[in-house]
């Protein structure tokens, strides 16, 4: 018999199988990366919304006027109220601070995503006028 050059069908099938497994692993890593980036974006947006509310409350001149509350409707990343398809829910509580002229303000932003329910909470003590 003459010696044939080339690959057998079995060798080609094994090589293609190994290649396919490698490609599936890379695709899985890409999916995980995309999900992680989406969650990071949601977390950043929620932190921004909480920080924006804290700053508004810190800039009130008379802290005795601060009250516990929340947005009437859910809001989007631009703080625009939404009637349906809620994205972020923001609420805040005001409590007595360590001194008579201060208040402890806690802002919580809640949202739901494909990865479950999440929340960001920021807390500060303010005396008003940006302090």
Image (cartoon, rainbow, N blue to C red):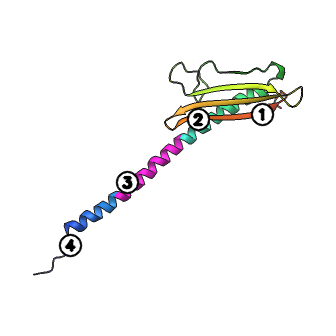
User: What is the magenta range?
Assistant: 21-38
Say which label, 3 or 1, has the lower sequence index. Answer: 3
| Callout in the foreground (2, 4) | 2
Q: Is residue 19 left or right of residue 80?
A: left
Residue pictured at 51% horizontal, 38% vertical: 115
Question: Residue 118's mark?
Answer: 2
* Real-space CA distance between mark 2 and mark 4, rounded to the nearest whole angstrom: 57 Å
Q: Is residue 28 left or right of residue 2?
A: right
Q: Are marks 3 and 4 in contact (CB under 8 Å)?
A: no
Which is more toward the observer, 68 or 3? 68
Placement of the C terminus among the 4 image quadrants: top right
Q: Give the residue at mark 4.
A: 6
Q: Secondary structure at mark 3?
A: helix
| Callout in the foreground (3, 2) | 2
Q: Give the residue at mark 1.
A: 124
Q: Secondary structure at mark 1?
A: strand
* Magenta stretch encompasses residue 9: no
Q: Give the residue at mark 3.
A: 24
Say which label, 3 or 4, has the lower sequence index. Answer: 4
Q: Position of residue 40 (x, y in %)?
A: 57, 42
Placement of the N terminus among the 4 image quadrants: bottom left
Q: Are marks 3 and 1 in contact (CB under 8 Å)?
A: no
Residue 52 occupies quadrant: top right
Q: Is residue 101 above or below residue 1?
A: above
Q: Position of residue 130 (x, y in %)?
A: 81, 30
* Magenta stretch encompasses residue 29: yes
Q: Is residue 19 above or below residue 109?
A: below
């Amino acid at each position: 018999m003459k010696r044939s050059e080339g690959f057998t069908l079995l060798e080609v099938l094994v090589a293609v199988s190994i290649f396919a497994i490698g490609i599936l692993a890379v695709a899985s890593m890409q999916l995980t990366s995309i999900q992680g980036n989406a969650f990071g974006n949601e977390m950043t947006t929620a932190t921004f919304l909480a920080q924006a509310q804290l700053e508004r409350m810190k800039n009130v001149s008379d802290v005795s006027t601060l009250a516990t509350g929340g947005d009437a409707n859910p809001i989007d990343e631009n703080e625009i109220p939404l009637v349906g398809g809620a994205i972020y829910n923001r609420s805040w509580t005001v409590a007595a601070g360590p001194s008579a002229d201060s208040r402890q303000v806690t802002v919580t932003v809640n949202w739901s995503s494909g990865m479950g329910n999440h929340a960001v909470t920021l807390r500060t003590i303010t005396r008003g006028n940006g302090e």
